[in-house]
Amino acid sequence: MRLALPAALAAAILVSPGAVLADEVWLAPRPFSPAAGSPVEIGLRQGEHFRGNPRAFRAEATAALQLYSKLAVRDLREQLAPEMDVGMLRLTPAYPGTHMVVYDSEPGLAERAAGEFGAWLRDHELEQVTLAREQSGTAGEPARERLRHHAKTLLRVGGKSDGTYGLLTGQRLEIVPTVDPLARRPGDTLVFNLLFDSKPLPGVLVRAWHRDERQTVIVRARTGADGKVALVLPWTGVWMVGAVHMVPAGDIADADWDSFRASLSFELGEDGAAR
């Protein structure tokens, strides 16, 4: 039986469609490769085709915000005050090595027209959702989603990287490199694990985005039976790897689908060292 959310809870997680429907949410550090003891600003961005606008951090919309390193895990929600927008997180990594920032949003509810949703499903190759809507006779009806964003970014502090890139954080949908992306060169094959609820997720489209002032490059492939996907990234600079997974929402009356969107951003250097 599907239960309606209490009115107060439904209001707390409801967000405007314009704020939640964009395909990607990612973390954007400045710089990606700071010196140890130097400040870093980390923004949250949201948009399509790796072109996005700043999105504020809000305590009410943040389920988790953490900094992982080889020595500790730090909760960054201390920087978020209730009912206040925070445009940038500010960090000062004290020691060399990989530092990974992890962001999980609270769920948000949104609805969009049948045609728009159908086109979006085709673009993301979510055939199982299209088929389920056709079989249930709801393909011509608006789509109601409960969305969650899961974003990660990697910093290469003091010119060093380490195994922190491969730590599991428990995100519902999580992209985990099997090799250190910060130690690879353009043209290398990078392999990523895609996990849903900590289990390998097969058959899902994974895209890697790169953008500069001239063009946007997209590299795409599907995960295999083991949940792994291999991508060859041809250019130096900032990349964002993203994936979407959807399952029926069976526990509330306000949504038909649970939509999970994951991203991982990092900088690929010319010689296996991020710039």
Image (cartoon, rainbow, N blue to C red):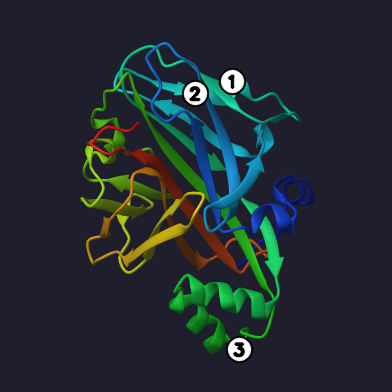
Q: 10 Å neighbourhood of mark 3: few (<14), some, or many (≥20)?
A: few
Q: Residue at x 38, y 52 (%)?
A: 197
Q: Is residue 153 above or below residue 51?
A: above
Residue named by callout 2: 75
Secondary structure under tag 1 reads helix
Residue appearing at x 60%, y 37% in the figure? 62
Q: Residue 73, image x and y in percent?
A: 39, 23
Mark 1 or 3: in front is: 1
Q: Earlier in the sequence, mark 3 or mark 2?
A: 2
Residues at badges 1 and 2 in contact (C-beta under 8 Å)?
yes
Question: Is 255 situated above or below 190?
Answer: below
Element class at badge 2: strand
Q: Distance from label 3 to label 2 (Cα)?
A: 45 Å
Residue 170 visible (yes or no): no
Where residue 108 sits in the image (x, y, percent)? Answer: 65, 52
- The amino acid pointed to by label 2 is Asp
Amino acid type of disc 1? Glu
Callout 3 secondary element:
loop
Q: Residue at x 24, y 28 (%)?
A: 162
Quadrant in which the N terminus is drawn:
bottom right
Q: Residues within 10 Å of mark 1 (few under 14, many from 20)?
A: few
The quadrant the C terminus occupies is: top left
Picture quadrant where residue 269 is located: top left
Q: Which residue occupies the foreground of this view, 76 or 10?
A: 76
